[in-house]
Amino acid sequence: MIRKLLIANRGEIACRIIKTARRLGVATVAVYSDADADALHVQLADEAVRLGPAPAKESYLDISKVLDAATQTGADAVHPGYGFLSENAEFCRACHSAGIVFVGPPAGAIEAMGSKSAAKRIMEDAGVPLVPGYHGTNQDPGILEGYAQRIGYPVLLKAAAGGGGKGMRRVDRVEDFYAALEAAKREAQNAFGDDLMLLERYVVNPRHVEIQVFCDQKGGGIYLFERDCSVQRRHQKVVEEAPAPGMTEELRARMGEAALRAAQAIGYVGAGTVEFLLDARGAFYFMEMNTRLQVEHPVTEMITGQDLVAWQLAVAAGEPLPLEQEDLHILGHAMEVRIYAEDPDNDFLPATGKLVRHRPPKESESVRVDTGVQSGDEIGVHYDPMIAKLICYGRSRREALAKLDRALQEYQIAGVRHNIEFLRRVINHREFAGGRVSTHFIEDFEAEILHQEHQLTPQSCAAIAACLSDWESRDLRAAAPRADEHSPWHGGDNWRCNLASARSHNIEYRGQQVQLSLRHSGEQLHWQCGDMQGAIRALPGREIALVDGRRMNYSCVQTRGGGSVFIDGTQVEFSLLPPDLGEGDGRAQGLDAPMNGTIVTLLVEPGAQVEKDQPLLVLEAMKMEHTLRAPAAGTVREFFCAEGELVDGGSLLIDFAEE
Ligand code: MV4
């Protein structure tokens, strides 16, 4: 029995683990960095220990600090969550040596999955299907090219040390083989310090289907069915669902049994995930095994009715698995999306800033929100910018999808850029909605999914007008003499004095500058913008407006330099510009690193004249490459960074002069 659990993580997963521990009567210890002193996971835990400064290397990744925290607080077990130290064999061993239970697999199982080629040998021996290919140690280019011929083109070169698509290269023709091999080796050497390559037949347009497995310390093992995580963008999962569309009982059983053979081949204990590529003909191939609880585990929980963290704690305490294979059944369908602080309009650059509003939809039997942030939190540069996971359940896939779309419409986030609109486009796309998911989906339909409506519509104007009117009433009330409660200023009914004349606001909406004029007449607020006009009646403080006679709920938030209005399932974001645009102010003068990272490439020379949105440099951070673009037409005067350099989030990278 575990009495006290230290959660060696942060954010939503730390909160999620704490919730189960609390339900089971297990005491919890949170750890935190300076950036997280007021974070939700710290508030939820029974006690909390400071690890160190914000950078993960000095806090969440520092093995001795985490262990000290466990020893000091008398924790008898450590849950590593995902990321950070979760797949670190050294940390796992250090816990054991300190007499602390590591809630996860044995160190040897983590290590066995460290190298792709070693893992493939183990899986081959265990009878787990592999993509036809070569994973030997002979790296002679001629020999490899011979294998490529035998496998048949197209082939895929993969770095043995790689993961997440890094050091991977598709080769379509023998003529390209040697050049591709050289490039892939160079990339692998730079990224992993190891250029051992393996060779596989290229599986065209595959799906990513993974099996959740669970093993206890007594040799028992079961699988909790599959998740389809095919919808990814640059190897980052976007939507996950269970069961996989089109899955048959027969294929599910074969994949489940193969996954269990994989787990048992490495002496696995605890929650694990075996990833497979699934081709169009229903053939499946082992990709890799994740030796941790995964981000997307909630979809499995929803369709099986189980709590996987509770299972992890039971197994870690030496108990047998809570259920047997025959006891497990799939009921209904679950879908998860990852809500990120990022800008889909700007190459998905991570967004930072104050989360002025975080108002998730109401949770229920069929709507689950896993999050680690609250309104007022700062989204910083040091960690993964995920705001929340939204998971919805339905009796059918269609129902789950409808609920997910509804919940996304209700979700209110203001202050930082986010991907909610992007997610809605993804899940409502005809191919996705029809269950035709594949790993190429986002790429194939990028134009449709990223398509942005830039036109200011009458509805958006009405929403902004309602918002500005709200603020005016609020400001007027604040300025009114407080003593007289009978004063018309306190009526909240838009009564105004000396405000009959039109006010004009200089608004920026999706890069466009427009004039929005407001004029009160009786209870009506007339607005006009260009050749559009309309009338609304806002009931201030009640978040209800009559827009051209139609009653609508709306809600506005004031953010830095502007506001956000949530109306009719959409968000209208705008900036309020000063009426007189003085020269100098508001002109782009430099570009900062959006987060900690490494400079990959500088794309222009100092002194270069560039167009608006022209790529200037590539920064790698959080396993992803981000392109920094010119904010306007202008001149790149100087770079304050070099290729290969580590830069801190927020540091000035480019001296830029707007034209
Ligand atoms: C493949 C493949 C096609 N054929 N292997 C990408 C990440 C790495 N874990 C495995 N990956 C792939 N391996 C063969 N032989 C296509 C991918 C792939 C992919 C796999 C899963 C999810 C998304 C993907 C996106 C692009 C490519």
Image (cartoon, rainbow, N blue to C red):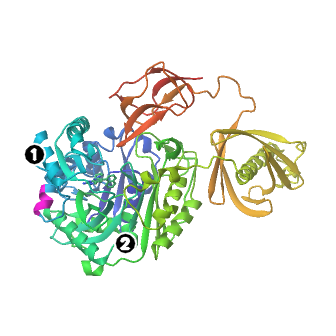
Query: SS for tag 2?
Result: loop
Residue 656: give x, y in percent of width and height: 52, 23
Find the distance from the CA under tag 2 to the CA under tag 1: 38 Å
Count of picture labels: 2
**Quadrant of the snapshot with the N terminus:** bottom left
**Above/below status of 589 relative to 414:** above
Name the image quarter holding residue 522: bottom right
Q: Is residue 161 magenta?
A: no
Residue 274 picture location, percent across and down: 25, 62
Q: Earlier in the sequence, mark 2 or mark 1?
A: 1
Residue 445 or 187: which is nearer the viewer? 445
Q: Which amino acid lies under the numbered mark 2 shown in the image of this protein? A: Gly
Res 139 visible: no
The one of 239 and 44 positioned closer to us in this rendering = 239
Residue located farthest toward the bottom when viewing the structure as drawn: 326
Give the overall secondary structure of the magenta segment.
helix
Q: Secondary structure at mark 1?
A: loop
In depth, the one of 74 and 521 nearer the eye is 521
Q: Amino acid at mark 1?
A: Thr
Can residue 262 be spotted in the picture?
yes
Instruction: Answer few, some or many: residues within 10 Å of disc 2's Cα (few below 14, many 20 plus, some between 14 and 19).
Output: few
Residue 246: mark in rendering: 2
Question: At which x and y percent is residue 169?
Answer: 27, 44
Q: Give the residue pinned by disc 1.
A: 137
User: Magenta segment range?
Assistant: 121-125
